[in-house]
Structure formats: structure tokens, C-alpha cells
Image (tube, grey):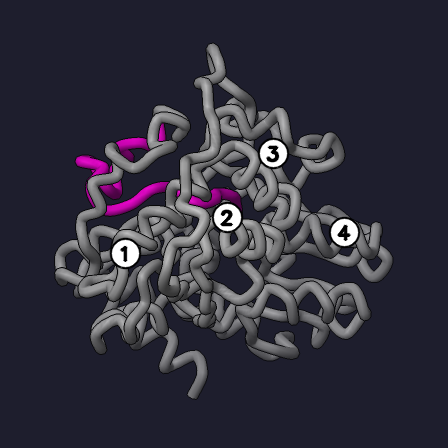
Amino acid sequence: MKKFLSTTGFVLACVAPSIAAHAAGTLNLYIWSGYIAPDLIAQFQQQSGIKVNIDNYDSEETLLAKLKQGGAGYDIAVTNQAMIPVFVREGLIDKIDAANIPGYGNITARFRKPQWDPTGEYSVPYLWGTMNFAVDTSVYSGDINTLKLLFNPPAPLQGKINMFDSADDAISLAAIEAGVPACSEDPKQMQKVLDVLKQQKPFVKTYSSKAGAIRESMVSGEIAMSAIWSGTAQRASDLKHSIRYAYPKEGSLAWVDNIVVPKGAPDIDNAKKFIAFLLTPKAAATNTNFLKYQNAVDGSNAFVADDVKRAPELTPPAGAKLVFKQTCSTAAIRLHDRVWTDLLK
């Protein structure tokens, strides 16, 4: 996994794409809260003259619903790899002719035509990482590298847990613990997933997928364990060194977030200019330094801070079992909805 972040072979020559100094218009971005370095927005606006407007969503389900409603005038959206085949199948995103966008050649080869976008027509990679949980080891000092800790916590952690409030993310983690496929269409298997989540529920203080709120709650001591993304965990541990990120022996969820253009985007030209900007090594490294997630841009490693490169949250240990999120069938999604509704009632 380390080679995802390091420069492979020779570094492709990369210069920032030429962006018109006085380009007109706006760019409407739909993204997770706090999921882009503020410096990048400022730099792009200064270089391009394009004003960037940002709206946030709190789950992939919210994003899907928004795109089904017509995209609400967004030029760019960021989504995980499992959603892209769904968006393509339902006609919710446009082809972007990625290979002709300046900077496309900077994308690490394995991410150019990935399994979720085999023709490379609909997306470019944004950031990637893992999704497990973190523990405040000043509260609990035992072995943390097992999902049993999250779903059947010992007394010191009970009532001090945050769990994702996204059905997809919570069920994906619980499915690993239950030993069943996250996209199973078998009601008996999904009942096992529901049992895992119900076992955990009495010990959960909050359900939230807001990265900033999770980080702040862990640092303040309001919660002592939370389902969390690797980058959020690193940012939390920078502020409170007793916070440690787990790599469960049962498996770690891995994800790749991607940039897409919603169907009917008001300004696809500005969208492509923004994508080209994000594909420059310095821009990609700025995001990695700020968000603590790996990017997929060759040459960016030269600009990534040493402490970020060394962080355990950024690079899974040798032998770590990675389980990449998959695109679920309609039948599996219906089961997800039933599990989640049953859990929260």
C-alpha cells in the first residue's frame, strides 16, 4: 500500500495547467463538510477568477437524492467509488473526457481506468484511505485492533461511542464483523449484520458522520471511541496523542473518493478547469497535508510533509486486510434500508 503514496518509476513532468487569469463565472461544488483544503479554494479563485461556492452533504444517500432531484445546479461533486456505477446506470453524471483534461497524465496509472469506471470517462480520483475506528487509549489501553471492541465494547468505553449515521458506512463495518458480504441479498445474512448493530446500540452515545464533530468530540473527551476515517483520525491524534487508529484483524474498509460532474452541470468548462487544478502535484499534496488522506497524483509526494508521510493512519501496516467498498444491487440496497430502519426505530 505504501506505493500508492510514493512516486512510482519516473515522475511525470508536471506543471500547473494554464488557467485564464480573468475567467468568468462560478463553480458550484458539492462535497463532504471540510473535505477540501481552504488554501486550494483560495488559490484556484485567485488564479482563475472563478468564484467557488461550496455546499456540503452528510451521507452518500443525501448525495444520491440530490442528484436524482436534478443536481441542484452543481458543477462538481465528490463521491466514493461504489456510487459511480449507480450514478452512471441512472444517468446522474456526465462524461467528462478525462483523458483530455490537463493533468490527466499525472494520475497514478492504476487509478486511470479503475474497476468502478473502466473506461475512465466519468471520474477522476480525489483522495483515498481507510475507514475503521479510533480509540482514546487514555480511557482504554487494551488491544484495539479488532472490530469486537467497536461492536461489543468493554465497560470503560460503553456510553462513550460515536457510530456513523450513514447506513452504507455503518453496515459495511458491521458486515465485516458479522463475516458476511456487505452487499448480500440474503435476508438471513443481513439479519446477522443487524444483530451486530443492535448489540452495539445500547453503548452508542451519538450517531454522526460529520468528520469535524467526530474529531472535536474525541479531542474534548466527550467520546472515547468512534467509527472514523483515517485522515480524521490522524488530525485528531495530532491534537490529542492518546487517540490511536485501529487496523482490525477482521479487515479494514478501504475507499477511493472521486470527482464527478452531475448531469446538466451549469458550467462544465469551469468544472474541467477545477479538475485540472486538483490534478497538479502541489494541489494534490496540499490536500493530503491538510486532510491527511492519500492522493492519486504522481509527483505529489515531493510536496507532502514528512510527518504526514510517516503517520500510521496514512499507510496501512504490512499484511493489513483491506476490504474495498463495492457497488450494491438494488435488492441489497433495499435490505440495507430495512436493516437501518429496524436499527433506529
Q: Residue at x 53, y 66 (%)?
A: 33
Q: Earlier in the sequence, mark 4 or mark 1?
A: 4
Q: Earlier in the sequence, mark 2 or mark 4?
A: 2
The dot on residue 47 is 2
Q: CA distance from mark 3 to mark 1?
A: 29 Å
Q: Are marks 3 and 1 in contact (CB under 8 Å)?
A: no
Residue at screen point 49% across, 28% down:
4
User: Earlier along the polypeptide chain: callout 3 or callout 1?
Assistant: 1
The percent coordinates of residue 188 (x first, y second) are: 28, 64
Give the mark nearer the N terminus: 2 vs 1. 2
State how far apart marks 4 and 1 are (Cα): 34 Å
Q: Nearer the viewer, mark 2 or mark 1?
A: 2
Q: Residue type at mark 3: give it.
A: Thr
Looking at the image, tell me whether mark 4 or mark 3 is earlier in sequence order.
4
Q: Nearer the viewer, residue 11 or 254?
A: 11
Report which residue position mark 4 lands on: 237
Q: Quadrant of residue 90?
A: bottom left
User: What residue type is disc 2 on?
Assistant: Gln
Name the residue tied to disc 1: 261
Residue 62 image offset from top left, x and y in percent: 36, 73
- The residue mark sitting in front, 3 or 1, is 1
- Which of the labelled discs sits on residue 108, or is there none? none
Q: Is residue 114 magenta?
A: yes
The residues colored magenta run 110-132
Q: Is disc 4 surrounded by few (<14), some (14 to 19) or many (20+) residues within 10 Å?
A: many
Question: Could you give the CA–CA distance between mark 2 and mark 1, rounded to whole angstroms?
Answer: 21 Å
Residue 315: mark = 3
**Distance between mark 2 and mark 4 Cα atoms:** 34 Å
Residue at 58%, 56% in the rendered image:
42
